[in-house]
C-alpha cells in the first residue's frame, strides 16, 4: 500500500524527498521524474519513489477537481483511515500520513504541472499498458496429414491496455511484412516526437516526457 509506504518513511528521508521535488527544474521534466530525484535521495530507491509520485500526482488531481485544499484532503484521508481496519493501516500513523500528504500537495509548481500533464495524458478511453509479440510456426498440410507440405511463420501482436479501470488485451496476427510496417510506423512516430520536442523546447514552454 503506497500510503503506508509514505507514512513509514523516516522523517529525514521524507524531508529530503520534498526538498528534492521543490528544487526540481520544471523546464525539461518527465511526468515520472523519480529518476531525476534519485541522485538527491540515495536512501530512497527509484522503485519506491515511482508509486509515491504517481499517488501524490493522482491525489493532486483529485484535490483540484473537487476544489479542496491540501489541508482538507489530508484531513479527509486521516478520517477515512481512522474508520478502516487497523490491520490495513495503523491508526497511530494516520496523523503522520495526513501531514505528509498535505506537505506534498502544497509543494506548488512542480506538482501542479506534473499532475495536470498526467491528467491530460491519461484522459483517454484506452491507455497503453504493455506489448508482446508471440511467434509461431504453423504447418501446412495438403491432401495427407501424414506429412507437412509447407510451413509459415505467424506473429501475434498482443497489446495490453487499461480501460474503465480494468486491464484488457487484444491480439492481431501479422506476417513479416506487417511487422515491418509496424516497425516503420513506430520509427516515424519516434522521429516526429523528437521534432515536436525540439519545437516545444525552443518555444520556451515546459516540456514533459512520459518515460513510463
Image (spheres, helix red, strand yellow):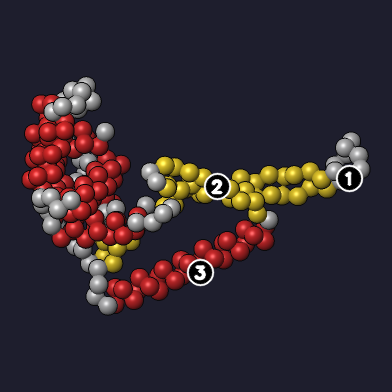
| Marks 3 and 2, how far apart at CA | 23 Å
For disc 1, the neighbor class at 10 Å (few under 14, some 14 to 19, many from 20) is few
Judged from the image, the secondary structure of the residue bearing numbered disc 2 is strand
| Marks 1 and 3, how far apart at CA | 41 Å
Name which quarter of the figure residue 33 lies in.
bottom left
Judged from the image, the secondary structure of the residue bearing numbered disc 1 is loop
User: Which residue is most to the right?
Assistant: 143
For disc 3, the neighbor class at 10 Å (few under 14, some 14 to 19, many from 20) is few
Camera-near label (2 vs 1) is 2
Residue at image position (27%, 78%) is 203
Please report whichever mark, 1 or 3, sits nearer to the chain's N-terminal start. 1
Residue at image position (91%, 39%) is 144
What residue did someone put label 1 on? Answer: 142
* Residue 100 visible in image: no
Residue at image position (25%, 48%) is 58
Quadrant of the drawing holding the N terminus = top left
Camera-near label (1 vs 3) is 1
**Where 36 sits versus 1, above or below?**
below
| Marks 2 and 1, how far apart at CA | 31 Å
Please report whichever mark, 3 or 2, sits nearer to the chain's N-terminal start. 2
- Image location (x, y in percent) of residue 205: 25, 72
Residue at image position (31%, 73%) is 200
Judged from the image, the secondary structure of the residue bearing numbered disc 3 is helix
Say left or right for 42 vs 151. Answer: left
User: Which residue is most to the front?
Assistant: 66
What residue did someone put label 3 on? Answer: 188
What residue did someone put label 2 on? Answer: 170
Amino acid at each position: 500500500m503506497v500510503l503506508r509506504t509514505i507514512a513509514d518513511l523516516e522523517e529525514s528521508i521524507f524531508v529530503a524527498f520534498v526538498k528534492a521535488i521543490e528544487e526540481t527544474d520544471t523546464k525539461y521534466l518527465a511526468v515520472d521524474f523519480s529518476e531525476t530525484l534519485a541522485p538527491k535521495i540515495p536512501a530512497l530507491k527509484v522503485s519506491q519513489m515511482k508509486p509515491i509520485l504517481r499517488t501524490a500526482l493522482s491525489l493532486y488531481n483529485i484535490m483540484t477537481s473537487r476544489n479542496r485544499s491540501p489541508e482538507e484532503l489530508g484531513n479527509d484521508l486521516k478520517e477515512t483511515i481512522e474508520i478502516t481496519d487497523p490491520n490495513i493501516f495503523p491508526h497511530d500513523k494516520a496523523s503522520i500520513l495526513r501531514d505528509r500528504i498535505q506537505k506534498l500537495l502544497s509543494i506548488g509548481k512542480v506538482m501542479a504541472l506534473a499532475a495536470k500533464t498526467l491528467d491530460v495524458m491519461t484522459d483517454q478511453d484506452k491507455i497503453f499498458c504493455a506489448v508482446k509479440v508471440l511467434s509461431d510456426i504453423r504447418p501446412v498440410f495438403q491432401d495427407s496429414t501424414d506429412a507437412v507440405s509447407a510451413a509459415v511463420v505467424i506473429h501475434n501482436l498482443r497489446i495490453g491496455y487499461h480501460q474503465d479501470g480494468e486491464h484488457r488485451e487484444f491480439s492481431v496476427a501479422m506476417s513479416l511484412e506487417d511487422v515491418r510496417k509496424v516497425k516503420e510506423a513506430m520509427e516515424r512516430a519516434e522521429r516526429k516526437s523528437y521534432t515536436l520536442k525540439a519545437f516545444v523546447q525552443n518555444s520556451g514552454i515546459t516540456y514533459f516526457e512520459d518515460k513510463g
